[in-house]
Amino acid sequence: MPEAPLSRGAQHPPPAVPRDQPPTSATRTATAAGPSGLLASLAPLLAEWLPRQRWFAGKGRPVTGFALVSATELLPWRAGGGMPGLLHLLIRAQQPEPPGHRHGFGCGHRRGAAASDCYQLLLGARPTLPPPLAPALIGRPSGGPLDGQTVYEALLDPRLTTLLLERLRMPGRLGPLRFVREPSSAIPSALPPRVMTAEQSNSSVIYGDTFILKLFRRVSPGTNPDLELPLALAHTGCTRVPAPAAWFEAEPPAEGAVPPPEPVTLGVLQPFLAGSRDGWQLALDALAAGGDFTEAARALGHATAEVHLAMARALPTSVLRRPQIDHLAAAMSERLDSAAAAVPALQPYRAELHGAYEDLAALGRAGRTWAAQRIHGDLHLGQALLTGDLGGGGGSGGGGGRWSLIDFEGEPSRPLAERRRPQPPVRDIAGMLRSFDYAAAVGRHERPQEWAGRTRAAYCAGYAEASGTDPRDEPELLRAHETDKAVYEVLYEARHRPDWLSVPMTAIRRLATARA
């Protein structure tokens, strides 16, 4: 994983953390005060600060208001004291509803309410900020319980992130929050923290190169797959995925809902694979050295199959029959039409791309079925970590290295219920195949399609060796999923990285031609 400078302020001893502490008076007051208290004083600051954060999902739409779900003092602030305060918030950011919005992140969202996403915030409070914490500044509230204090992003304060680790070391409840620790996990105290800077949809803190805490920013009721799947895999004995050591969650207010909303997963603590390197950088290094990546890709295919087989043992599976296959193909076609309307470059290829989905639906009508199970959901080279050496020189071999898979959250933009649904394993495979294409293009290989083709073939061969099933033996299913992924990439690149649009468009032309 990417390294970051070690924070020097982490040597302070952590404050004592009480077990099973009931809600503090400040917690009850903040929640009850609603818009006239804590939230009203923070809203102007959050309206400016929140949209600037990389993990904020509502960019491009104005924030029209906030609703407070819960407020919990993890460390009460005391006037005149030498310690900072730590406040945990769950808030709903209200915005104009975008087309197709499904209220997937409402955190106990009431039916009929305005469109909103629920976010987890950790706020520090001090009279003034020391210079090293200046980049963490959010602002100074006027009125409310934090009147005149300096409020800031708590994850940049080593003292407060150390407190968070201490909370995870000692299971129990604090107001609506519940901290859980695996009985077999050994979590040392006073591990120096540092915040990862390469995060996008979430935030992570590394503790002493021993553990990594992933904090989910946009949250919704239900167990996050990044906790559910690694926990289930650990119970099968699968060692390809770091097993959760501790986690914490919140119980959102029922607000009259029947049944009440499920607990919200807020953060997961897992072993940190120190010294590991992600597959994306390894592939680029191999390209820069003039080597191929086939042995590494074969080993990665083997690791992917091991994880798929373990998930099928640990969690329920299903069978996709004609109704499900029709729905799958129709959803892919709908995404293609939407993307083509936004990106004209797709228009000349629409007929052949739709044909790939029709081929899949035709097999369903002919009685073909496919197994579905829980999958990674967003698999690519950046989600694979290699510990040890590739071997073979120039990044060309499998060597003594071992692949692990991480980040089982799935595509964060999709509703949680959709991400937890059984799907064909080939969706993960298609994501990895597309990642090889990207590496070949970004690495500027003189014959990128040739390099990617060899690497893709090696990955599929490794998968087949471990699973007994070669994804290339079901070309219609693989092509439909790879086409769907490439269409998504076209839309993403057109919106965010126009200079990269040629990468998925090359795949679009290849997939359209292959079908023809």
Image: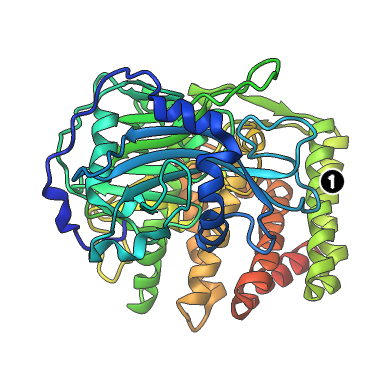
- Of residues 502 and 291, which is closer to you in this image? 502
The amino acid type of the residue labelled 1 equals Ala
Q: Is residue 245 above or below residue 214?
A: above
Quadrant (top left/top right/bottom left/bottom right) for the N terminus: bottom left
Q: Is residue 300 above or below residue 290?
A: above
Look at the image and tell me whether residue 348 can be seen. yes
x, y percent for residue 304: 46, 43
- Element type at mark 1: helix
- The residue sitting at 11% across, 48% down in the picture is 11
Q: Is residue 337 above or below residue 17?
A: below
Residue at the extreme bottom: 446
- Left or right: 107 as drawn, with respect to 447: right
x, y percent for residue 383: 44, 52
x, y percent for residue 389: 23, 58
- Of residues 30 and 55, which is closer to you in this image? 30
- The residue sitting at 50% across, 72% down in the picture is 440
Chosen colour scheme: rainbow
For residue 415, which quarter of the picture?
top right
- The residue sitting at 24% across, 21% down in the picture is 184
For residue 268, which quarter of the picture?
top left
x, y percent for residue 486: 67, 62
- The residue sitting at 88% across, 64% down in the picture is 351
- Residue holding disc 1: 330
Look at the image and tell me whether residue 376 can be seen. no
Quadrant (top left/top right/bottom left/bottom right) for the C terminus: bottom right
- Left or right: 513 as drawn, with respect to 157: right
- Left or right: 47 as drawn, with respect to 178: right
